[in-house]
């Protein structure tokens, strides 16, 4: 989704984990929308929170990009697109 891509773009520009509020602000999203996107990206393994979900106190979690997992997703996407083009 565009929201997820906006969150990924923010995280990709930082070498250190980023606070939830900063992710929302830099992505131009409401805090709730950023939270939803981060949760979906975390479920996919693409981002990582600084604490396990069960231990999170709320918006104090800092987020980072799981670059290795993102690379895998991008390779899978590239292969899927290439095989789709071969069938066309």
Image (spheres, rainbow, N blue to C red):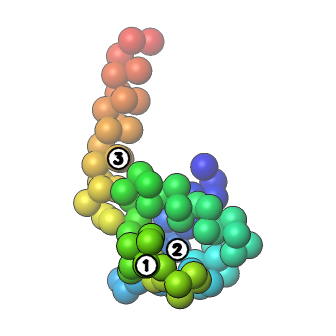
| Quadrant in the picture for residue 52 | bottom left
Report the side of 75 relative to 42 (left or right): left
* Residue plotted at (36% across, 57% down): 45
Task: Please determine whether, in this image, residue 66 is positioned above or below residue 82.
Answer: below
| Label 1 neighbour load within 10 Å: few <14, some 14-19, many 20+ | few
Secondary element under disc 3, as helix, strand or loop, is helix
The quarter of the image holding the C terminus is top left
Instruction: Determine the residue located farthest toward the front in the rendered image.
Output: 54
Secondary element under disc 2, as helix, strand or loop, is helix
Q: Position of residue 7 (x, y in %)?
A: 55, 67
Query: Distance from label 1 to label 3 (Cα)?
Result: 28 Å
N-term-proximal mark, 1 vs 3: 1
Query: Distance from label 2 to label 1 (Cα)?
Result: 24 Å
Residue corresponding to mark 2? 10
| Quadrant in the picture for residue 75 | top left
Task: Please determine whether, in this image, residue 28 is positioned above or below residue 79.
Answer: below
Query: Distance from label 3 to label 2 (Cα)?
Result: 18 Å
Residue 56 visible: yes
The circle on residue 55 is 1
The circle on residue 41 is none
Report the side of 62 relative to 35 (left or right): left
Residue 12 visible: no
Residue corresponding to mark 3? 73
* Residue plotted at (39% across, 80% down): 50
Secondary element under disc 1, as helix, strand or loop, is helix
Q: Position of residue 80 (x, y in %)?
A: 36, 29
Mark 2 vs mark 1: give the one in front: 1
Task: Please determine whether, in this image, residue 63 is positioned above or below residue 6.
Answer: below
* Residue plotted at (70% across, 69% down): 32
Q: Position of residue 69 (x, y in %)?
A: 30, 56
N-term-proximal mark, 3 vs 2: 2
């Amino acid at each position: 989704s565009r929201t997820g891509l906006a969150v990924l773009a923010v995280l990709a520009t930082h070498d250190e984990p980023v606070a939830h509020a900063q992710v929302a602000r830099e992505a131009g999203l409401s805090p709730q929308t950023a939270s939803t996107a981060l949760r979906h990206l975390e479920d996919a393994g693409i981002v990582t929170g600084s604490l396990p979900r069960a231990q999170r106190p709320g918006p104090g979690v800092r987020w980072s990009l799981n670059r290795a997992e993102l690379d895998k997703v991008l390779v899978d996407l590239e292969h899927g697109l290439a095989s789709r083009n071969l069938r066309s």
